[in-house]
Amino acid sequence: MSLPATLPPEPTEDAVPERAPVDRPRLSWKLFARAGAGLVGLIILGGLLGWLLRGPIEWAGTGFIDLFGLGGLGVLTLLVDASPLPLTNEPLMVLAIGADVGLWAIFGVMSAGSTLAGVVGWIGGRIIGQHTAPGRWLMLRYPAVQLFLVRWGALGVAIAALTPIPFGLTAWAAGMARVPFWKVALASVARVPKTGFYLWLIAQGWALGG
């Protein structure tokens, strides 16, 4: 089911239609199954990379940190997580671990960048709106995320922050739907525990692979 490309007209005083109730969909068990499989996959991925590509990853990660520092890691995390395209920041975690950066330092900068990404995505969604060509393209390209956001509101942003649902895209949709800024900013804080947990899992796999 896709959302309409334009908003419905404002009702007149002569005829005010009743607002149809919106049923909040139950979260599918498949989503939680994907999340569980993803957690196991992170350990396996970290182990395989630490075993097969440890040298190249250490070289690339060290070069990146030497050139851009931890600030660059935070900015790149923000750009990846704020993208309306379904990108993921786990490769950045692998690079930072390969560069032998402390886990607490990685956690701090990546948590900050990922949380701020929700705010940046919301601002981007407010700027383009629903009536511009980019806004209509996003609505038509990802109708499931749009419908999810309409039915769950700011809570949908928090759910996306913790699950495989694209977080950046959901933040953009929240801006387009004019979900209150402070609610989106608060929901984005859910990226902090997810970042820490995912980082710990990848680090365990990396250590096993070594």
Image (cartoon, rainbow, N blue to C red):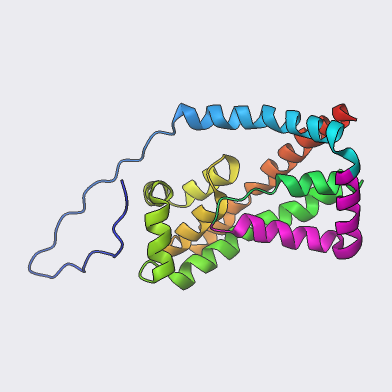
**Where's residue 161, x and y in %?**
58, 46
Above or below, 48 against 195 in this view is: above
Residues in magenta?
56-84
Quadrant placement of the C terminus: top right
The image quarter containing residue 85 is bottom right
Q: Is residue 85 visible?
A: yes
Q: Nearer the viewer, residue 179 or 146?
A: 146
Q: Residue at x 86, y 52 (%)?
A: 60
Q: Residue at x 90, y 57 (%)?
A: 63
Q: How many marks?
A: 0
Quadrant placement of the N terminus: top left
Q: Is residue 102 visible?
A: no
Left or right, 194 with reference to 143: right
The image quarter containing residue 47 is top right
Left or right, 162 with reference to 156: right
**Where's residue 7, x and y in %?**
28, 64
Above or below, 168 against 194 in this view is: below
Q: Residue at x 72, y 37 (%)?
A: 197
In the image, farthest residue toward the left: 14
Above or below, 191 against 50 in this view is: below
Does the magenta portion include 68? yes
**Where's residue 27, x and y in %?**
44, 34
Does the magenta portion include 109? no
Left or right, 200 with reference to 3: right
